[in-house]
Amino acid sequence: MTVYIERFFRVIFDIIFLVKFLYLPKLSKDRSPYMDGMVKVYRALPKAAGADRIYLAGEVEQESEKQRRSDGTPLSPAVVTSLLELAKELDIEYHL
């Protein structure tokens, strides 16, 4: 019986969490305080062994895009060789 009561309260708290962070912001014109609260909750979670931070959806891609815009897109040696061979075959000047 205790297990069922514990599960019941977990479901109730999950519902409260969802209502607080998903539905209440829709009623408000400014979502940022709710999103900031959600981000703080996620950032406070324990990190996996060897992890330096917790990434939210899209953050890895955002950081990758930022780095590639400043440093360029990395190409593997096989791709570089293939491009150079294709440029030679088509008699196009191509320098990497």
Image: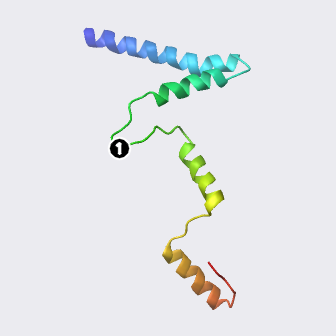
Frontmost residue, 14 versus 70: 70
Q: Amino acid at mark 1?
A: Gly
Name which quarter of the figure residue 75 lies in: bottom right
Q: Quarter holding the C terminus? A: bottom right
> Residue, x 53% and y 75% (percent of image)?
79
Name the element at disc 1: loop
> Residue, x 69% and y 87% (percent of image)?
92
In percent of width and height, residue 72 lies at: 62, 63
The image shows residue 52, relative to residue 71, as above or below, that is above
Name which quarter of the figure residue 58 lies in: top right
Frontmost residue, 79 versus 66: 66
Identify the residue position indicated by label 1 in the image.
50
> Residue, x 48% and y 30% (percent of image)?
43
Frontmost residue, 57 versus 67: 67
The residue at the far right in this view is 29
Quick check: 72 left or right of 50?
A: right
> Residue, x 69% and y 86% (percent of image)?
93
The image shows residue 45, relative to residue 49, as above or below, that is above
Number of marks in picture: 1
Q: Quarter holding the N terminus? A: top left
In percent of width and height, residue 84 lies at: 59, 83
The image shows residue 24, relative to residue 48, as above or below, that is above
Quick check: 20 left or right of 9?
A: right
The image shows residue 92, relative to residue 1, as above or below, that is below
| Category of crowding for the residue at label 1, using alpha-carbon neighbours closer than 10 angstroms: few (below 14), some (14–19), many (at least 20) | few
* Colour logic: rainbow
In percent of width and height, residue 89 lies at: 62, 90
In percent of width and height, residue 35 lies at: 60, 26
Name which quarter of the figure residue 36 lies in: top right
